[in-house]
Image (cartoon, rainbow, N blue to C red):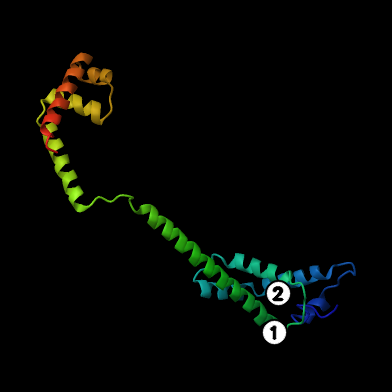
Amino acid sequence: MADNLFSRFDDRFYADHEFSLDVDENELISQHVADFIHQHRDELSRFIARKLGSEDVSADILQDAFLRLSSRQSPEAIANPRAFVFRIVANLVIDYQRLSVNRLSQDVDDEFLHAIPEDLPCPEKIYQYQQRLGAIHDAIKDLPETCRRVFYMNRVEGYSYSEVAERLNISESMISKHLAQAIKHCRDRLRHY
Protein backbone atom coordinates (compact mmCIF):
# COMPACT_ATOMS: atom_id res chain seq x y z
CA MET A 1 0.00 0.00 0.00
CA ALA A 2 1.36 3.43 -0.92
CA ASP A 3 2.12 6.07 1.66
CA ASN A 4 -1.25 7.31 2.75
CA LEU A 5 -2.78 9.41 5.46
CA PHE A 6 -2.64 6.75 8.16
CA SER A 7 0.26 4.60 7.06
CA ARG A 8 2.22 5.48 10.19
CA PHE A 9 -0.63 5.29 12.72
CA ASP A 10 -0.17 1.74 13.64
CA ASP A 11 1.79 -0.65 11.44
CA ARG A 12 0.48 -3.53 13.51
CA PHE A 13 -3.01 -2.79 12.21
CA TYR A 14 -2.01 -3.85 8.71
CA ALA A 15 0.02 -6.80 9.95
CA ASP A 16 -2.86 -8.12 12.09
CA HIS A 17 -5.54 -7.82 9.40
CA GLU A 18 -5.58 -9.56 6.07
CA PHE A 19 -7.29 -7.67 3.29
CA SER A 20 -8.40 -8.97 -0.05
CA LEU A 21 -6.93 -7.25 -3.03
CA ASP A 22 -10.31 -5.91 -4.19
CA VAL A 23 -10.80 -3.75 -1.04
CA ASP A 24 -10.70 -0.06 -1.89
CA GLU A 25 -7.85 1.91 -0.31
CA ASN A 26 -10.34 4.56 0.90
CA GLU A 27 -12.26 1.86 2.76
CA LEU A 28 -9.03 0.78 4.47
CA ILE A 29 -8.29 4.37 5.46
CA SER A 30 -11.84 4.83 6.80
CA GLN A 31 -11.62 1.62 8.79
CA HIS A 32 -8.25 2.57 10.21
CA VAL A 33 -9.53 6.05 11.15
CA ALA A 34 -12.56 4.49 12.85
CA ASP A 35 -10.37 2.06 14.76
CA PHE A 36 -7.98 4.82 15.83
CA ILE A 37 -10.82 7.08 17.05
CA HIS A 38 -12.49 4.15 18.82
CA GLN A 39 -9.22 3.19 20.49
CA HIS A 40 -8.70 6.78 21.77
CA ARG A 41 -12.39 7.62 22.28
CA ASP A 42 -12.19 8.13 26.06
CA GLU A 43 -9.15 10.36 25.82
CA LEU A 44 -10.70 12.38 22.97
CA SER A 45 -14.01 12.68 24.85
CA ARG A 46 -12.26 13.99 27.95
CA PHE A 47 -10.37 16.48 25.78
CA ILE A 48 -13.65 17.71 24.26
CA ALA A 49 -15.35 17.87 27.67
CA ARG A 50 -12.48 19.95 29.07
CA LYS A 51 -12.73 22.39 26.18
CA LEU A 52 -16.54 22.69 26.17
CA GLY A 53 -17.32 22.03 29.81
CA SER A 54 -19.76 19.28 28.80
CA GLU A 55 -19.64 15.79 27.35
CA ASP A 56 -22.97 16.15 25.56
CA VAL A 57 -21.58 16.85 22.08
CA SER A 58 -18.43 14.72 22.15
CA ALA A 59 -20.00 11.93 20.05
CA ASP A 60 -21.03 14.45 17.38
CA ILE A 61 -17.59 16.04 17.29
CA LEU A 62 -15.89 12.63 17.07
CA GLN A 63 -18.21 11.69 14.19
CA ASP A 64 -17.27 14.91 12.41
CA ALA A 65 -13.59 14.16 13.02
CA PHE A 66 -14.04 10.72 11.49
CA LEU A 67 -15.71 12.22 8.43
CA ARG A 68 -12.97 14.80 8.00
CA LEU A 69 -10.18 12.29 8.38
CA SER A 70 -11.67 9.62 6.16
CA SER A 71 -12.57 11.97 3.31
CA ARG A 72 -9.16 13.51 2.71
CA GLN A 73 -8.50 13.66 -1.02
CA SER A 74 -4.73 13.53 -1.00
CA PRO A 75 -3.47 11.16 1.64
CA GLU A 76 0.06 11.74 2.84
CA ALA A 77 2.15 10.32 5.62
CA ILE A 78 1.70 12.07 8.96
CA ALA A 79 4.62 12.28 11.36
CA ASN A 80 2.48 12.39 14.54
CA PRO A 81 -0.99 10.94 13.86
CA ARG A 82 -2.18 11.36 17.47
CA ALA A 83 -1.35 15.08 17.44
CA PHE A 84 -2.97 15.38 14.01
CA VAL A 85 -6.24 13.84 15.22
CA PHE A 86 -6.24 16.00 18.35
CA ARG A 87 -5.67 19.11 16.19
CA ILE A 88 -8.66 18.20 14.02
CA VAL A 89 -10.82 17.59 17.11
CA ALA A 90 -9.63 20.90 18.62
CA ASN A 91 -10.58 22.72 15.40
CA LEU A 92 -14.01 21.09 15.46
CA VAL A 93 -14.46 22.17 19.09
CA ILE A 94 -13.60 25.75 18.09
CA ASP A 95 -16.11 25.56 15.21
CA TYR A 96 -18.76 24.26 17.61
CA GLN A 97 -18.06 27.08 20.09
CA ARG A 98 -18.35 29.70 17.35
CA LEU A 99 -21.64 28.29 16.13
CA SER A 100 -22.96 28.07 19.70
CA VAL A 101 -22.06 31.68 20.45
CA ASN A 102 -23.70 32.87 17.24
CA ARG A 103 -26.80 30.76 17.85
CA LEU A 104 -27.03 31.93 21.48
CA SER A 105 -26.67 35.60 20.57
CA GLN A 106 -29.38 35.26 17.91
CA ASP A 107 -31.71 33.47 20.33
CA VAL A 108 -31.12 36.07 23.03
CA ASP A 109 -31.57 38.92 20.57
CA ASP A 110 -34.84 37.47 19.23
CA GLU A 111 -36.19 36.76 22.70
CA PHE A 112 -35.15 40.19 23.91
CA LEU A 113 -36.75 41.97 20.96
CA HIS A 114 -40.02 40.05 21.29
CA ALA A 115 -40.19 40.77 25.01
CA ILE A 116 -40.18 44.54 24.54
CA PRO A 117 -43.68 45.97 24.21
CA GLU A 118 -44.08 47.96 21.02
CA ASP A 119 -45.59 51.10 22.53
CA LEU A 120 -44.60 51.69 26.11
CA PRO A 121 -46.77 54.39 27.66
CA CYS A 122 -44.97 57.22 29.36
CA PRO A 123 -45.35 57.61 33.14
CA GLU A 124 -47.88 60.40 32.63
CA LYS A 125 -50.12 58.11 30.53
CA ILE A 126 -49.79 55.32 33.08
CA TYR A 127 -50.92 57.73 35.81
CA GLN A 128 -53.89 58.83 33.67
CA TYR A 129 -54.87 55.20 33.01
CA GLN A 130 -54.70 54.43 36.72
CA GLN A 131 -56.88 57.43 37.55
CA ARG A 132 -59.45 56.47 34.93
CA LEU A 133 -59.50 52.84 36.11
CA GLY A 134 -60.07 54.01 39.68
CA ALA A 135 -62.94 56.25 38.52
CA ILE A 136 -64.52 53.35 36.59
CA HIS A 137 -64.25 51.15 39.65
CA ASP A 138 -65.88 53.79 41.84
CA ALA A 139 -68.67 54.37 39.29
CA ILE A 140 -69.48 50.66 39.12
CA LYS A 141 -69.30 50.36 42.91
CA ASP A 142 -71.96 53.11 43.22
CA LEU A 143 -74.48 51.18 41.08
CA PRO A 144 -77.39 49.41 42.79
CA GLU A 145 -76.62 45.72 43.53
CA THR A 146 -78.72 44.13 40.77
CA CYS A 147 -77.64 46.71 38.21
CA ARG A 148 -73.98 46.15 39.11
CA ARG A 149 -74.32 42.35 38.86
CA VAL A 150 -76.05 42.58 35.47
CA PHE A 151 -73.38 44.93 34.14
CA TYR A 152 -70.54 42.76 35.45
CA MET A 153 -71.98 39.47 34.19
CA ASN A 154 -72.73 40.84 30.73
CA ARG A 155 -69.84 43.21 30.07
CA VAL A 156 -67.00 41.60 32.05
CA GLU A 157 -67.81 37.89 32.15
CA GLY A 158 -69.45 37.88 28.69
CA TYR A 159 -72.76 36.21 29.53
CA SER A 160 -75.62 36.78 27.10
CA TYR A 161 -78.84 38.54 28.13
CA SER A 162 -80.66 35.20 28.43
CA GLU A 163 -77.88 33.66 30.55
CA VAL A 164 -77.84 36.67 32.91
CA ALA A 165 -81.65 36.64 33.11
CA GLU A 166 -81.65 32.93 33.95
CA ARG A 167 -78.93 33.25 36.63
CA LEU A 168 -80.49 36.31 38.31
CA ASN A 169 -84.05 35.09 37.76
CA ILE A 170 -85.23 38.30 36.06
CA SER A 171 -86.57 39.02 32.56
CA GLU A 172 -84.37 39.90 29.58
CA SER A 173 -86.10 43.27 29.29
CA MET A 174 -84.98 44.04 32.86
CA ILE A 175 -81.44 43.04 31.87
CA SER A 176 -81.60 45.57 29.06
CA LYS A 177 -82.88 48.31 31.41
CA HIS A 178 -80.21 47.59 34.05
CA LEU A 179 -77.46 47.70 31.40
CA ALA A 180 -78.75 51.01 30.02
CA GLN A 181 -78.83 52.45 33.55
CA ALA A 182 -75.27 51.20 34.30
CA ILE A 183 -73.84 52.57 31.05
CA LYS A 184 -75.51 55.98 31.52
CA HIS A 185 -74.27 56.15 35.13
CA CYS A 186 -70.68 55.28 34.16
CA ARG A 187 -70.74 57.71 31.21
CA ASP A 188 -71.92 60.54 33.46
CA ARG A 189 -69.30 59.77 36.14
CA LEU A 190 -66.44 59.51 33.60
CA ARG A 191 -67.34 62.58 31.57
CA HIS A 192 -64.21 64.52 32.56
CA TYR A 193 -61.83 61.61 31.73
Q: Is residue 55 visible?
A: no
Mark 1 is surrounded, within 10 Å at the Cα level, by few (under 14), some (14 to 19) or many (20 or more) other residues, namely few
Specify whether 92 is left or right of 79: left
* Kind of residue indicated by mark 1: Asn
Q: Which residue is mark 2?
A: 36
Examine the rendered structure and indicate whether residue 107 appears above or below residue 15. above
- Locate residue 190, reporting x and y percent: 13, 34
- Locate residue 83, reporting x and y percent: 65, 82
Q: Which quadrant holds the N terminus? A: bottom right
Specify whether 5 is left or right of 175: right
Q: Quadrant of residue 21?
A: bottom right
Q: Which residue is mark 1?
A: 80
Q: Which label sits in the foreground, 1 or 2?
A: 1
Q: Residue placed at 14% from the left, 43% from the top?
A: 131
Q: Residue placed at 68% from the left, 72% from the top?
A: 37
- Locate residue 99, reporting x and y percent: 53, 66
Q: Residue placed at 58% from the left, 68% from the top?
A: 58
As drawn, the label of residue 18 is none
Specify whether 130 is left or right of 159: left
Q: Is residue 8 visible?
A: yes
Q: Quadrant of residue 56?
A: bottom right
Report the front residue among 140 and 32. 140
Mark 2 is surrounded, within 10 Å at the Cα level, by few (under 14), some (14 to 19) or many (20 or more) other residues, namely some
Examine the rendered structure and indicate whether residue 133 appears above or below residue 106. above
Upstream in sequence: badge 1 or badge 2:
2
* Kind of residue indicated by mark 2: Phe
Q: Which quadrant holds the C terminus? A: top left
Give SS at disc 1: loop
Q: Residue placed at 28% from the left, 28% from the top?
A: 158
Q: Quadrant of residue 107?
A: bottom left
Give SS at disc 2: helix
